Amino acid sequence: MAKLTILTLPDKILRKMSLPIERVDEGVRTLAEDMLETMYAAPGVGLAAVQVGELRRLIVLDTAKGDDEPPRPLVMINPQILALGSQMRRHEEGCLSIPDVRIEIERPSSVTVAFLDREGKRQELTAEGLLATAIQHEIDHLNGKLIIDFLSRLKRDMIVRKFKKQAKAEVTA
Ligand code: NI
């Protein structure tokens, strides 16, 4: 396994649409393993392939918390939302591609999703709570959508400007 570099704002790839995976092969399984390692090391509860520079519809998640729960890695290939619950849930979300920014976002509190697992087998899962939030967050990534898009344009531009400035400072430093 290898730890990958997580791309951050204002990297333009984060705004691109990821493409469906045609065949679940060794390359896809290796990428999923590497993404899990990268996510655990960060640490984070979810990661989309686009965040490591791969425009493929693949997300990994683990919302098991801390030492009292065993890890529960989830790999979803070509995830598709089948249904969203009617109840809403507010949660302060962060994103590994937007370090140190947290935004309170309201999303449906449950989601049913279809996806291919690491063996290429079709699975369906209904999730609630943090996992439901994380799945929606990661699928947004596959469509080029970020948590700052839930903000007003003014606030969003402020955050983007800050990251552009930081990136510039790093290049010239
Ligand atoms: Ni994110």
Image (cartoon, grey):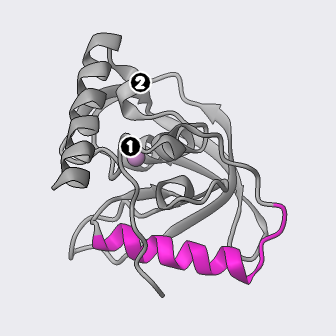
Image mark for residue 129: 1
Q: Can you give x and y, in whole percent of width and height, for residue 81 in the image?
A: 66, 39
Q: Quadrant of residue 4?
A: bottom left
Residue bearing the label numbered 2: 149
Which residue corresponds to the image point at 33% horizontal and 19% vertical from the top-left? 151
Visible residue check, residue 120 = yes
The yes-or-no answer for disc 1 within 8 Å of ligand 1 is no
Magenta residues (range): 22-41
User: Dot 1: few (<14), some (14–19), or many (≥20) neighbours within 10 Å?
Assistant: some
Q: Quadrant of residue 157?
A: top left
> Is residue 23 on the magenta stretch?
yes
State which tag comes first along the sequence, 2 or 1.
1
* Label pair 2/1, CB-CB below 8 angstroms: no
Q: Which quadrant holds the C terminus? A: bottom left
Which residue corresponds to the image point at 27% horizontal and 64% vertical from the top-left? 65
Marks 2 and 1, how far apart in space?
A: 21 Å
Residue that protrudes farthest toward the front in the picture: 172
User: Dot 2: few (<14), some (14–19), or many (≥20) neighbours within 10 Å?
Assistant: few
* Secondary structure of the residue carrying numbered label 2: helix
Q: Can you give x and y, in whole percent of width and height, for residue 18 in the image?
A: 66, 47
Give amino acid for label 2.
Asp
Which residue corresponds to the image point at 54% horizontal and 29% vertical from the top-left? 85
Residue that protrudes farthest toward the right in the picture: 22
- Is 27 placed above or below 134 here? below
Query: Relative to the observer, which residue lies in front, 26 or 128?
Result: 26
Left or right: residue 30 versus residue 129 is right
Which secondary structure class fits the magenta region best? helix
- Is 24 placed above or below 26 here? above
